[in-house]
C-alpha cells in the first residue's frame, strides 16, 4: 500500500485525499496517537482532528487505551495514551478463488484480518461460469455472520485464466472459459451491490502474500494446483508483462519430456495419477500421497524425488530470467515442498555450473487460501485508496456510517 497520496486541487479532492491518507496511515501502523497521525500526514493538529472526527463519527476509526498494549518507542512514561485504530467490523471484503477442482473463499475485515474461510471440492471444467461463481458466493455467504453482508465493501474473484482489465476472461484452457465477463457474472450472483475486481489466481496469490508481508525486491510466486500459475512482484507492485501473462512458467515446455509443460510434471493431477498407478489404487487423494511421503513409503518417495527434480529445473530457469530475491510457493501441492526441500536444493546446485546466488524458497503462510485471500485484499486496497467510492462524496458531505 502506498504511504503517500497525491493532493488534488478541489476541496472535494483534498478532503478525499486527507481521509484516505489517514486511513492508510492508521492501517499501516495499526495504532497511532493523534499527534503522530498529524505529523505523518503533514497537517496541524486541528486539521488532522477534523479528519479523525469524521472517520470516528463514520465508524471507521476508534480510540483505544494504550495500556495493556506494547508502548510505541515515542510514547512518554506516565498515564496511558489514547491511540487511534481502525474499527475491524466497519467493513468486510470477500475473496473467492475458483480453481480447477475446488473453490475457496475468504472474508477479511478492515484490518485485513481473515474472519472466515471455506473450501469445497468442485469440478469447474464440468460446470458453467455462472454455476461456479454462484457456488463460491453461496459458500462464503454461509460462513459470514449476520450483518457482515451489509458492511461488505467489495468482492474479488480469482481464476486460472487470462483476464483483461475490464474483467473479461479471454482464455482459461484448463477450465474451458473463453470471452466471459467474470465481473458481470459476479455482480449478478452477489447479494449486495459492491465494487468487484477479478484477477488471475496466481496474481491474486502474489498480491495477498505481499499485502500480508510487505516485501520489497523481486519475488516469484508459484501457485501449484492442477495447473501451475506464476506471478511476479517487484518492490511490492505486480509485474504483468506486455500482455498480462508474466510469470506463467507453468506453460513452459520442458526439453526431453515429450512435449510436456511444467504444470504437467509438477501439478496436482500428475502427482495423484502417478501415485494411483504406482500402488494400484484408484481413489488415493493428495493428502494420502503427502502422508505417505512423510512416512517414507518408497513409491511415494520416488514420485516426490522426480517432482523435486522437475521443480528444481523450473525454478532454475526462472532464476536465470528474473534473479528473484524470494520464491513463494502456494496451492495444495506446496505442502510437498518442505518434505523435499533438501532434494530441490541439491538438484538446483547440480543444475548450474556457475554458483549463481539462489533465492529463499518458502511456502506461503496459508498456501491453500492464498489466492482467495489475495482476491479479498484487492478490494481492501481499493477501499483505502482514491478509487474508493466511500469517501468521494460531495464537498462537505459526511462519511456514511459503517453501520448504516
Image (tube, rainbow, N blue to C red):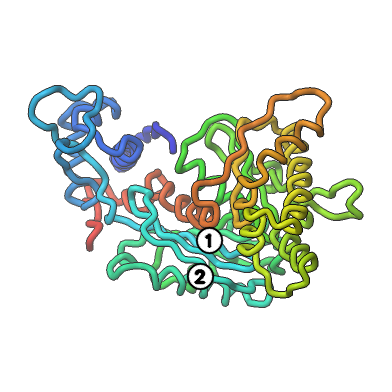
Please tell me which residue lies in front, 16 or 74: 74
Quote the CA–CA distance across marks 2 and 1.
9 Å
Residue matched to label 1: 157
Check the picture and name the quadrant holding the N terminus: top left
Q: Is residue 180 visible?
A: yes
Residue 136 tag number? 2
Q: Position of residue 116 (x, y in %)?
A: 39, 61
Which residue is at the front of the view, 259 or 192? Answer: 259
Instruction: Tell me whether the residue at label 2 lies in contact with that at label 1, contact meaning CB atoms closer than 8 angstroms.
Output: yes
Q: Is residue 171 above or below residue 389?
A: below
Whether residue 384 sits left or right of residue 236 in the image: it is left
Q: Residue at x 32, y 35 (%)?
A: 29
In the rendered image, which quarter is residue 344 located in? top right
Q: Residue at x 43, y 62 (%)?
A: 117
Given this view, does label 2 or label 1 mark the residue nearer the observer?
2
Position of residue 34 measured from the top left corner of the image (x, y, whole percent): 19, 32
Amino acid at each position: 500500500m502506498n504511504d503517500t497520496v497525491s493532493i488534488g486541487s478541489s476541496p472535494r479532492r483534498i478532503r478525499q485525499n486527507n481521509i484516505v491518507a489517514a486511513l492508510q496511515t492508521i492501517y499501516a501502523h495499526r495504532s497511532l496517537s493523534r499527534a503522530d497521525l498529524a505529523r505523518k500526514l503533514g497537517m496541524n493538529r486541528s486539521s488532522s482532528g477534523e479528519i479523525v472526527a469524521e472517520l470516528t463519527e463514520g465508524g471507521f476509526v476508534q480510540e483505544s487505551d494504550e495500556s495493556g498494549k506494547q508502548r510505541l518507542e515515542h510514547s512518554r512514561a506516565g498515564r496511558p495514551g489514547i491511540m487511534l485504530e481502525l474499527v475491524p467490523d466497519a467493513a468486510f471484503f470477500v475473496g473467492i478463488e475458483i480453481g480447477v477442482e475446488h473453490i475457496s473463499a475468504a472474508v477479511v475485515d478492515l484490518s485485513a484480518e481473515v474472519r472466515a474461510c471455506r473450501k469445497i471440492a468442485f469440478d469447474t471444467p464440468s460446470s458453467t461460469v455462472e454455476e461456479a461463481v454462484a457456488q463460491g458466493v453461496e459458500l462464503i455467504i454461509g460462513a459470514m455472520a449476520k450483518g457482515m453482508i451489509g458492511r461488505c465493501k467489495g468482492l474479488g474473484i480469482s481464476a486460472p485464466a487470462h483476464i483483461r482489465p475490464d474483467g473479461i476472461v479471454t482464455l482459461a484452457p484448463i477450465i474451458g472459459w473463453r470471452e466471459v465477463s467474470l465481473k458481470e457474472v459476479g455482480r449478478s450472483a452477489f447479494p449486495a451491490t459492491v465494487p468487484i475486481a477479478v484477477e488471475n489466481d496466481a496474481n491474486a496469490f502474489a498480491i495477498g502474500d505481499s499485502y500480508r508481508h510487505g516485501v520489497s525486491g523481486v519475488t516469484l510466486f508459484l501457485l501449484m494446483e492442477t495447473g501451475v500459475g506464476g506471478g511476479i512482484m517487484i518492490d511490492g507492485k505486480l509485474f504483468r508483462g506486455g500482455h498480462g501473462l508474466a510469470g506463467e512458467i507453468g506453460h513452459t515446455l520442458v526439453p526431453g519430456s515429450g512435449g510436456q509443460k511444467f504444470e504437467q510434471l509438477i501439478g496436482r493431477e500428475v502427482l495423484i495419477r502417478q501415485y494411483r498407478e504406482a500402488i494400484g489404487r484408484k481413489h488415493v487423494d493428495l493428502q494420502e500421497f503427502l502422508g505417505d511421503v512423510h512416512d517414507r513409503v518408497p513409491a511415494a518417495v520416488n514420485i516426490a524425488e522426480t517432482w523435486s527434480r522437475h521443480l528444481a529445473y523450473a525454478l532454475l530457469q526462472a532464476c536465470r530470467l528474473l534473479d528473484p530475491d524470494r520464491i513463494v510457493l502456494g496451492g495444495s501441492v506446496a505442502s510437498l515442498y518442505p518434505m523435499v526441500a533438501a532434494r530441490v536444493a541439491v538438484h538446483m546446485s547440480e543444475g548450474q555450473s556457475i554458483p549463481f546466488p539462489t533465492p529463499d524458497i518458502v511456502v506461503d503462510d496459508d498456501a491453500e487460501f492464498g489466492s482467495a485471500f489475495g482476491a479479498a485484499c484487492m478490494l481492501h486496497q481499493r477501499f483505502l485508496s482514491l478509487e474508493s467510492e466511500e469517501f468521494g462524496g460531495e464537498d462537505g458531505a459526511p462519511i456514511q456510517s459503517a453501520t448504516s
